[in-house]
Image (cartoon, grey):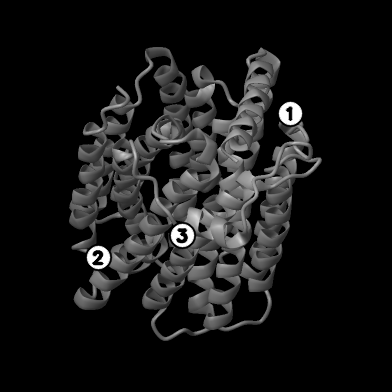
Amino acid sequence: MRDQQSSDTSIALDANTDVQQEADKPAVKWRYLFGFLAWTVLNAIAFYMTASIMIPQRLKDIGVANPDATLGAINAAGAILSIFYAVFIGAFSDRTRSRFGRRTPWILGGAVLYGVAIWVISLPTSGLTIGIAYCIGLIGLNAVQAPLLTIISDRVPEDFRATASAAVGGGGVAGQAIGMLIASLFINHVEIGFIVAAVFALLSGVLSIIIFPREPSNVDMPREETSVGQILIHTLTPPTKGASDFWKAFICRTCLLVAYQMITSYQLYILQDHIGLSNTDAAKAISVMAIITMIVSFIAAIISGPLSDAIKRRKPPILVACILYAIGIAMPWFIPSVAGMFLFAGIAGFGYGMYSAVDQALNVDVLPNKKDAGKDLGILNIATCAGQAIGSFVTSSIVTMTHNYNLVFPTAIVIALCAGASVLTIKRIK
């Protein structure tokens, strides 16, 4: 049995080596770069159109009594469920065998489910139906995201990972800005906006697969003789051996995303309730913020990702990113006006662009076992889901107790600085 496992591992490693040698070719590298860029831009457009603008406005339009608390509950439920989606999908994609490879079927199927779920929210609905459809959509989102990000570990050469990560990060923040800009155009017609977002969600998976070099068939690769129960046990077993840096990266990501979610998911309500703008004026302000964020985040990503590869260091750009994000959050706290929100968009947007550009490269570098990349990257994605859940819960709790957003900003600043402190303790990378 041990000889068979050794043989299986050897075959898998040989196949992976061949793929990475092919990926060393410049033209192939560019296809990975643009494939990741296509996915992240289109996916972020769909996600942030839906989660940051249209669902909050939809809750107000249908007359939900406490939209802040309802939005927090929807985000928290979706994020908590995503914890399980990401880990299970990542683990099962590691073991998938098909003539299209092990990641491609999940990416295409997930994109279809994601788009359909967003479309359902456009139908006549209630707060409960919105929450259920949103959670189902996150199954599709994770079915795309978990396998797709594992491609960085599977097929992208080490000296190109931060550049590929920059495409993920830069595309994500640019897509976020574009998504909020597009969503602001549908602030009074959110039903149409949800349909537009559904199209972007579908295209995110389809176009990425078209652009990527075709994933080789793995039908003939030996299958591990494991039952579903054994896979589930393996999936639920977190890495421990040589995993201290892995968990420090997990804490860094969790803290920064908590701070991020605390402000970004509530920016429509901050503009309406904290700054005092009307729906129309808030939509206009979000449009300007979206443009600012898109420009500075994309600049930050295209600089910091390749720079990280060139200097072979991950920690300095991430530390600077956390500090900039904390400074950006302070702007609307000290300057409670549209100008303060614009400064937040510029400073925090640049910081988050820096972090996003290097994040995936850092995650791959601290993996304890590359053979379990899908599962372990799925566990790291728990940080994203936990950050979303905790961030929404913290903001909604503070607003419910104090009836204002004044304490939200200093709380988010402290959490962002904790993210920077955590990355400094990582030892495996510089």
Asked if one can make out residue 301 in the rendered structure from this viewpoint, the answer is: yes
Q: Secondary structure at mark 1?
A: loop
Dots 2, 1 in contact, CB < 8 A = no
Looking at the rendering, in which quadrant would you find the C terminus?
top left
Closer to the chain start, of discs 2 and 1, is 1
Dots 3, 2 in contact, CB < 8 A = no
Looking at the image, residue 97 lies above or below residue 6: below
Query: What residue did someone put label 3 on?
Result: 83
For the residue marked with disc 3, what is the amino acid?
Ile
Q: Dot 1 surroundings within 10 Å: few (below 14), some, or many (20 or more)?
A: some
For the residue marked with disc 1, what is the amino acid?
Pro
Asked if one can make out residue 52 in the rendered structure from this viewpoint, the answer is: no
Q: Position of residue 331 (x, y in %)?
A: 24, 47
Instruction: Estimate the spatial distance between the alpha carbons at disc 3 and disc 2, rounded to whole Å.
Output: 28 Å
Q: Secondary structure at mark 2?
A: loop
Residue in the foreground of this view, choosing between 15 and 398:
15
Q: Position of residue 315 (x, y in %)?
A: 30, 27
Residue in the foreground of this view, choosing between 112 and 172:
112
